[in-house]
Amino acid sequence: MSLTVYDDYIAYSRQHFEEGLIRGGFTESDAGWRGPISHSGRATEVLITLRSRFPFQPPRVVPVELDLVPWSWHRELNGSLCLIAEDDHDGLWWTEASEFVEHITAWFERADAGWPDDRLDLDLDRYFDLSEDARVYLYDDLEQHRNGFVRFRPAKNDVMRIGTGTRPAKVSKHSKDRFGYVADLGEVVAPPRTWDDIAALIDPTVDLERRIRDHTVAVLVLVYRRGAHDGAIALGARVRIGWRGARR
């Protein structure tokens, strides 16, 4: 395929998709294509944007009013809908606007029904930014550390190994140990996205926010459960109560 044919195909695909949106009642704005999705006797306004790699990358869909649509495991960190799995890219079917809108409608209808027969993935890491700390944090059975303080010590090959311990009053400036806490969130219905979400699921008597501000907790390991499955994620804590997922 020549570059000219390739460019023509991309231009045609975008125009064809946008014309389909117009027929479906969508209008173009500076932010994207805005229109209603009818489901369960009501309608929700969404914004559809064609990303740079369209048609080889599906459009992004975000509710116009982010918090009017319940947050769930089927939404991304930025609020967009999780519509297409990585293994569902055959045929670039989303280039047909009518079929894509039907897929959005099905998403809302399943959300209204409470996601029946949902696959319980342990992918809480998708809801946090990747840490700038390139070291790998290793932990074994976390049951012995559950709701307790831990100490990560450096090992070979940029590995940090978990152990029990709290940060002493004085720490050598040459020490590369990092101190943390293992918190049990229990059954997580919707993924926490902010510190307030996390704090609401943690024992308040531990006063983790103060410990983070005092630099006595630098790593927070969250243990959570979805159905019969247990998961864990290590987060790096920052003084301003921001969170970045640690590598694991």
Image (cartoon, rainbow, N blue to C red):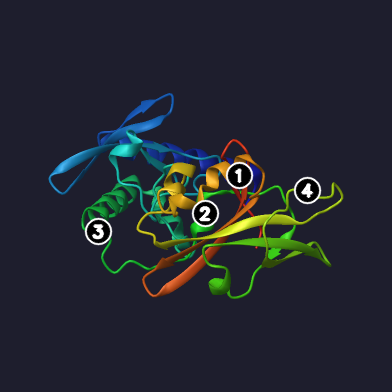
How many C-alpha atoms fall within 10 Å of the one at disc 2: few (<14), some, or many (≥20)?
Answer: some
Give the alpha-carbon distance from disc 4 to disc 3, as whole Å: 50 Å
| Relative image position of residue 48 (x, y in whole percent) | 39, 38
Closer-to-camera residue (202/30): 202
33 shown above or below 55: above
- In the rendered structure, find residue 212 and report the number of the disc placed on it: 1
Closer-to-camera residue (54/111): 111
| Quarter occupied by residue 226 | bottom left
- Residue lying furthest front in this view? 169
- In the rendered structure, find residue 126 and report the number of the disc placed on it: 2
Q: Are marks 1 and 2 in contact (CB under 8 Å)?
A: no
Is disc 2 placed on a helix, strand or loop? Answer: helix
How many C-alpha atoms fall within 10 Å of the one at disc 1: few (<14), some, or many (≥20)?
Answer: some
At label 1, the amino acid type is Ile
Is disc 3 placed on a helix, strand or loop? Answer: loop
Q: Look at 44% across and 50% down and name the residue there.
A: 204
What residue is disc 3 on?
114
